[in-house]
C-alpha cells in the first residue's frame, strides 16, 4: 500500500516538472473549499452574512472586521475528541483568514452580529456615504 503512494507522489512530481510550475496549485481552490463557509443574503439596503464556524467555545476566538466592500473573518476551527485518533475528517478544521466581497459598500456604524448554534450571523446595511475606515465587529453570544 505504501508503495502505491510513492508511485503517486512520483507521478505528480513528473507532471510538475513537465509543466514547469507546480501543476496542482491551479486546482487548490477547487480541491480545498473555502473556510469558513458563507451564505450571503441581500435585500434593498440590507445584507445578512451567515458564516459556518463550528466548535467555538469563546467568542474571542473569532475576529471580524468590516472595510467598505469587504468583510474579513479570522479564527480557528478545532474539533477534538481528547484521547481519540482522527480517522475520518469531513468537517474542515484549522486556522482561517477569509475576506468576503460584499455586493455593495456597507455602513460601519450600524452592524449587528451574534453567534448561535455554530453559525455567525452578521447584519449589515448599505452605506450611501463615502468613508474609508475599517471597523471591528463585536459578536454576541446566543439570541439576537
Image (tube, rainbow, N blue to C red):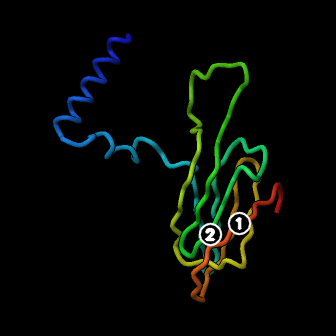
Q: Secondary structure at mark 2?
A: strand
> In the picture shown, does residue 142 fall above or below 16?
below
Drawn side of residue 115 relative to residue 44, left or right: right
Find residue 37 and report its horizontal and vertical position in percent: 57, 51
- Kindly indicate the quadrant of the structure image that contains residue 127: bottom right
Q: Residue at x 19, y 34 (%)?
A: 17
Drawn side of residue 71 relative to residue 140, left or right: left
Q: Quadrant of the N terminus?
A: top left
Q: Residues within 10 Å of mark 1 (few under 14, many from 20)?
A: many
The earlier-in-sequence mark between 1 and 2 is: 2
Q: Residue at x 59, y 37 (%)?
A: 91
Question: Alpha carbon of mark 1 to alpha carbon of mark 2: how far?
Answer: 7 Å
**Residue at the disc numbered 2:** 66
- Tell which of 135 and 117 is nearer to you: 135
Q: Secondary structure at mark 1?
A: loop
**Residue at the disc numbered 1:** 137
Find residue 117 and report its horizontal and vertical position in percent: 75, 48
Q: Residues within 10 Å of mark 2 (few under 14, many from 20)?
A: many
Q: Are marks 1 and 2 in contact (CB under 8 Å)?
A: yes
On residue 60, which mark appears? Answer: none
Q: Residue furthest bottom?
A: 129
Q: Residue at x 75, y 53 (%)?
A: 60
- Tell which of 101 and 131 is nearer to you: 131
Drawn side of residue 79 relative to residue 24, left or right: right
Q: Residue at x 62, y 71 (%)?
A: 47
Amino acid at each position: 500500500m505504501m508503495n502505491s503512494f510513492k508511485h503517486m507522489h512520483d507521478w505528480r512530481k513528473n507532471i510538475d516538472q513537465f509543466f514547469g510550475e507546480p501543476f496542482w496549485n491551479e486546482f487548490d481552490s477547487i480541491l480545498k473549499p473555502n473556510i469558513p463557509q458563507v451564505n450571503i443574503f441581500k435585500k434593498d439596503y440590507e445584507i445578512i452574512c451567515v458564516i459556518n464556524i463550528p466548535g467555538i467555545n469563546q467568542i474571542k476566538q473569532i475576529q471580524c472586521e468590516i472595510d467598505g466592500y469587504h468583510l474579513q473573518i479570522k479564527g480557528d476551527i478545532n474539533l477534538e475528541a481528547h484521547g481519540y485518533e482522527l480517522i475520518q475528517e469531513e468537517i474542515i478544521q484549522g486556522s482561517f483568514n477569509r475576506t468576503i466581497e460584499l455586493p455593495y459598500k456597507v455602513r460601519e456604524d450600524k452592524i449587528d452580529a451574534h453567534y448561535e448554534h455554530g453559525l455567525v450571523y452578521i447584519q449589515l446595511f448599505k452605506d450611501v456615504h463615502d468613508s474609508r475606515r475599517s471597523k471591528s465587529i463585536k459578536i454576541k453570544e446566543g439570541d439576537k
